[in-house]
Every structure is written in structure tokens, then in C-alpha cells.
Amino acid sequence: MITIQGPSLPEILGNLFTEKEVKAASYRAINRSLIAGRKAAGEEVARDYNVTGGKVSKIGRITKANSGNISGKINWKGPAIELKTWGTNPGMRKKKKNPRVWGKVSKSTMAMYSGAFLGRASGKTRAFIRTSKKRFPIVPVYGPSLPQLVGAERVRKRFVDRSNEMLKSRLEHEFNYILSQRG
């Protein structure tokens, strides 16, 4: 058996790049991968739900990496969204003895919200539900929030896959750029 031992990866990188160059390439690649991952998560949510990918991406706040802290993160934050915003059918209030409101949160199916009715409040048609047998009080009906949809396993997997893919390609690009600047 013949064993050949060459220099370790840190020794090779130490000869090619300074610590400052490695940090700069890393944080730039991380920031680009976070942006790509956020977009992929928005596209994945928009594929199944009645919302645009841009809305999902817009609420994803990125904490960027920098030379002092080579880690970044995305935080999706937002309230539950009223059912009327997701989409209801019928769109206007109907006077019926037993009104039914159908909500379209998912692109493929509509769900019936039993006991809900459409009414006007603040000049807008909204879906409401009674909290007791009496006429009042009533409360709006809400669908899921966008952060809940982003938290789905399928969406997280796509986010991680796309981010890792972009991180690898951007690190390679950044290191090639540093080498090209040396002349």
C-alpha cells in the first residue's frame, strides 16, 4: 500500500487567498444565496396558493452577512390574512336564509366556511362569523398567514435546495473573481 499525503485544504487556501478575501467571498455568496432562496420559497407558495410569489418574497426580511458576521438569515413575519383577500365566492353579499361563503385559499380547491357570511364594513365587503347566537358580536374570518405557508416542509426544502445550489456557484464565482483581480 502506498500512501501519498499532500497539503491540506486550509494550507492550499492559505496560499491562494488571505483570510480577508475568504470572508469577503463568503459573505457575498451567502447574501446572494439568501435572495435566491427567498425567491424560490415565494414561487413554491404561489404554485399552490392564491397569492403571488412577490408578496411572499416581500415579507421575507433578510439579515445580511458581513465581514464581521459571516451568517445571514431570513425571517418571514406577517399577520393572518382575511378570507376576503384570499378570494371568496360569491363576491357580493347575498340575502339568504342560510348563507354560505366559499373561500379560495388554495388554487386548486375552494372550501366552504360554514356559518360565515359576507357583509360590508368600512366600505369593503368582508367575510364574518358570529361569536354567539345573538346578532352581534361578529368577527372577520381569516385564512392562513404567509409565514405559515412558507413554513411548510415542501417550501422549506425548496428554499434550502435553491440556497445551497446558489451558494456553491457564487462561492466559485467569487473566488474566480478574486483570482482574476490579481493579474
Image: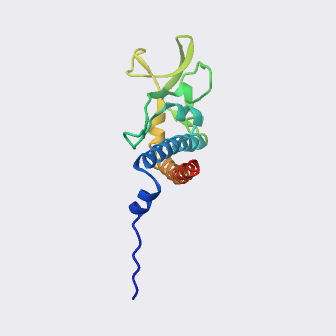
Q: Which residue is at a point 53% across and 31% down the rendered structure image?
A: 58
The image shows residue 132 at horizontal and vertical percentages of 37, 21
Q: Which residue is at a point 62% across and 20% down the rendered structure image?
A: 92
Please state if 103 lies on the left or on the right of 9 as rendered: right
The residue furthest bottom is 1
Q: How is the image coloured?
A: rainbow
Instruction: Give 183 or 86, whichever is nearer the viewer.
Output: 183
Instruction: Give 91 or 79, whichever is nearer the viewer.
Output: 79
Q: Is residue 99 visible?
A: no
Instruction: Give 4 or 110, whichever is nearer the viewer.
Output: 4
Vertical placement of 85 versus 72: above or below?
A: above
The image shows residue 140 at horizontal and vertical percentages of 46, 22
The image shows residue 141 at horizontal and vertical percentages of 47, 26
Q: Can residue 179 be seen in this view?
A: yes
The residue furthest front is 183
Q: Which residue is at a point 44% across and 58% down the rendered structure image?
A: 15
Residue 85 picture quarter: top right
Instruction: Give 4 or 128, whichever is nearer the viewer.
Output: 4
How many callouts does the rendering have? 0
Please state if 69 lies on the left or on the right of 172 as rendered: left
Quadrant where the N terminus sits is bottom left
Q: Which residue is at a point 51% across and 50% down the rendered structure image?
A: 167
The image shows residue 19 at horizontal and vertical percentages of 40, 49
The residue furthest top is 122
